[in-house]
Amino acid sequence: MVAVVPPSNQPQQPSPTEATVVLPVSVGPVRGHAAPSVLRRLGSIYTSRRTARGRGPATILSIYIVLLLLIPSRIVLPGVGATGTIANVFILASLVWYGVSWLMRRITPARYTRLPRLAMFFFAVAVLLSYIAAARRDSSALESSAADRALIQLVTWFAVVLIATSLREYADLERLLRIFVRCAAVIGAVAILEFLFKTSLTAWMTLPGFSNSGPELITRGDFVRPTSTAANTLELATVMALALPFALQQGFNPVKKGLVRNWLPVAVIAMSAVMTVSRTSVIGLALVFLTLLPTWPAKRLLPTMGALTLGVGFSSVALPGLIGTVVGLFSAMLNGGDNSTNSRTATSAVISQYFDERPWTGRGYGTFLPLMYRYTDNEYLLALVEMGILGVAAVVLVYIVTLHCGGAGRRRFADPARRETGQGFAAGGFVMLVVTATFDTLSFPMVAGLSFLMMGLAGAYLGMARQDQMLRGEPSL
């Protein structure tokens, strides 16, 4: 509330709940009951402006999540490639808003959120050093253009982390995670329909000024591997694995009661992940449960195991051969008869010559083009070639920071529901740390955007946890 100091001989004392602010204008004497009305109006305007400033980052990120997940990542600006997605265009425009707001001191990073920004800074240094290395060698025109596009992509990821670490309210974080889960459920439902009808449901989508390359659905065994709005089946599988821990957290801790409302997203996300018929999905789901189960109370374990058993049984009956095909993927890999595994092994031997040329800085981020060289299907190998040892360390650091912030925040919160949110971030970081070895994750806009978004949100979560710990009177270490 704002207290106006009237021009009288006897200065009035503000009440203990009022903050004394002298307005820089002459207001003159106020008669009757007009003063309380004016003060309430001024106070409401001041409060609404503060609320609007605080909700800015949450609104930006809400729109970004929707654009990132629901608009097919194959819809891009012509000539820009995967960097020119609608989500990236939007977040670049949002960076201008962030810069202006920061200069006007209307927005600043939240307290205790420095770690994700430091990790992002280290990643940016690795990219810039690789860019210099690309400029110093005899790069082709295609490689030079790819390196320039990589810098644009770096700016978008930096913007995501900056905006995410400006969140201060847990309610905003919770709302963003609900939007993420709902969007993941939507694209999971589309994937299930593509699997059942054996056709792409997003190839027709386009926007003026953008191009859509259109997915080519591939098969494995007797099953079509869906892509939904993702650029690749593996990208879809990874997104589902990242969304599952938060879907489970929201199912166990619902905002509103309702079996369908709270558990349908969990079923859709898990089923669509299995329907990708990929090792990445199985590994991702296994890592999620491996991270979550040890932290759950004992009363949850039996129902969870029962639900998993029913899910596998239903899949075996409704989709004969699906479980056998997925199991066969791992047996073929162990027996050395899997083409994709053999291709990855051959790639490891081929890229050693490129790594030996520039082991620390690499050849240039984004320049190891499949059209000129070959697919790596392993982001760690790709980073080793393009950014060297520093680049691999930077990629690992992004996932480690996500995992650490989730776990450290979980230990500081006292509320069980909020503690489970932290374990969801830890599970996401663990999943990305492992599945990055199965395909080139940062080459796909949806997974790459979510990786840096998760790191920024995990940092904001840790900052909120430390603030909560201090409010309880406990030292924040």
Image (spheres, rainbow, N blue to C red):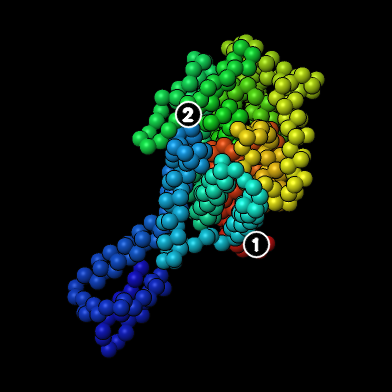
- Categorize mark 1 by other alpha carbons within 10 Å: few (<14), some (14-19), many (20+): few
Q: Where in the figure is residue 166, as x and y percent of width and height?
A: 51, 56
Q: Quadrant of the C terminus?
A: bottom right
Residue 78 appears anywhere in the view = yes
Quote the CA–CA distance across marks 2 and 1.
50 Å
Q: Nearer the viewer, residue 312 or 35?
A: 312
As helix, strand or loop, the secondary structure at mark 1 comes to loop
Q: Quadrant of the N terminus?
A: bottom left
Q: Where in the figure is residue 173, as x and y percent of width and height?
A: 51, 48
Q: Is residue 184 left or right of residue 356?
A: left
Q: Residue at x 71, y 44 (%)?
A: 384
Q: Is residue 215 left or right of residue 41?
A: right
Q: Indicate whether 76 appears above or below 217.
A: below
Q: Residue at x 65, y 53 (%)?
A: 136
Q: Nearer the viewer, residue 184 or 344?
A: 344
Q: Residue at x 70, y 25 (%)?
A: 340
Q: Given the image, on which type of amino acid does mark 1 rest?
A: Ser
What mark, if any, has residue 213 been given in the picture? Answer: 2
Residue 55 appears anywhere in the view = no
- Categorize mark 2 by other alpha carbons within 10 Å: few (<14), some (14-19), many (20+): few
What mark, if any, has residue 476 been given in the picture? Answer: 1
Circle nearer the N terminus (2, 1): 2
Q: Is residue 97 left or right of residue 355?
A: left
As helix, strand or loop, the secondary structure at mark 2 comes to loop
